[in-house]
Every structure is written in C-alpha cells, then in structure tokens.
Amino acid sequence: ARPVLERLSHETGETANLVILDRREALYLDKAESPQNLRIFSRIGRRAPLHCTAVGKILLAYRSKAEVDALLGRGRLECFTRNTIITVSQVRRELEKVRDQGFALDHEECEEGACCIAVPIFNARGAVEAALGISAPSTRLTPRRIEELVPDIVRAGRQVSEQLGYHGRHNTPATS
C-alpha cells in the first residue's frame, strides 16, 4: 500500500493513511505526510474511535449488525466535537450511507478543524481488510473539494484491494 499512499498524498496534497481494526479502535498502520505547511498530523500506531472517523466508519460499515454492536456497545458514544455522532442508531444510519456511496466522511466529528475521506480495502475474499483515507484541514476539504477527490481515493482503494486479490465483489454485511 505504501506506493499508493505516497501517490495519493502527492496527487491530493493531503496526508494519506492506512488503517486497520484493532480491538475496538482504528489503528494507523502507515501514512504519507502532506507536503503542505498546514496539515493534519497523524502518527503510525495512533488509535482513533470508530464511530466518528471516516476510516472507523469504513471499518464498521461492512460488518454484521452483531459485530457492530460488539464494537460500539449499547450506550451513548464518546463526544469529541459538536459534530460527533453519539448514538448507535445515528451510526447505523451513517453506515448505510457509507455502504451506498462506497466512501465515508468525517467532517470535524473527531477533531475540530480536521476532515477525512476514506474508502475500504477489500481482501481476496471480499471482506474489508483496512481503510484508506486522506485527512485535511476543514478549510481545504470543502464539499466541492471532496467531490473532486472521491474518484482519486476510490481508485487508490481499488488498487490496494486488487493487490490483495480482490476482484470486484464484496461480502455484504449480515443483518443479524
């Protein structure tokens, strides 16, 4: 994934991240830093919540209802900003949207001033192995810019997925 991360960061001018699910959190495995002076700092080994990050939503969206319940629990979720989704029912609605559109967004949900777009990385069995995302200051990641960047991020996610043996079909989350 490293060459894809570097190319995505170079093409978008933003920080690109590769993230996996570890226990009940998103774990940052690799990154390609933005060349811009104003950028979102991420650290390899950093952990982040699943419910309010784009990469976390990707890691949840393709799992069964039972797995999502186990990962999120049943109570209110931790609130980080005024935009944080704090109920499991809100997260479920967001995950449906993520599956429908094929990407996830975090618009200052985890940290004020930080936004992220993420896509799934599928393995050869069609299961989500990881999430690939770009992070940027909210001043640059405007709705128009998001629209421009989504095809690039989707293409990058597909490239990494194909390297893992993915051939275009993914497992649908079970309803139970």
Image (spheres, rainbow, N blue to C red):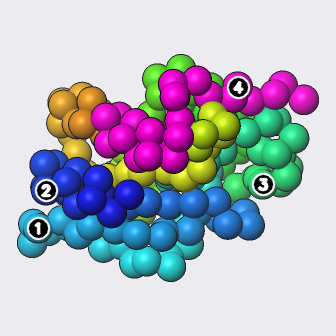
SS of the residue at dot 2?
Answer: helix
Give x and y (percent) for residue 109: 47, 52
Question: Quick check: 80 above or below 96?
Answer: below
- Which label sits on residue 35? 1
- Three-letter amino acid code of the residue under disc 2: His
- Which label sits on residue 10? 2
Local crowd size for mark 4, using a 10 Å CA cut-off: few (<14), some (14–19), many (≥20) = few
SS of the residue at dot 1?
Answer: loop
Which residue corresponds to mark 3?
A: 71
User: Who comes first in sequence, dot 4 or dot 1?
Assistant: 1
In the figure, residue 21 lies in which quadrant? bottom right
Quick one: quadrant of the C terminus? top right
Local crowd size for mark 3, using a 10 Å CA cut-off: few (<14), some (14–19), many (≥20) = some
User: Who comes first in sequence, dot 1 or dot 2?
Assistant: 2
Alpha carbon separation for disc pair 3 and 4: 18 Å
Q: Is residue 173 left or right of residue 25?
A: right
- Residues in magenta, as a range: 154-176
Local crowd size for mark 1, using a 10 Å CA cut-off: few (<14), some (14–19), many (≥20) = few
Alpha carbon separation for disc pair 4 and 1: 37 Å
In the figure, residue 37 lies in which quadrant? bottom left
Q: Is residue 8 magenta?
A: no
Give x and y (percent) for residue 97: 55, 25
Q: Is residue 114 left or right of residue 84?
A: left
For image coordinates 82% across by 45% down, the residue present is 67
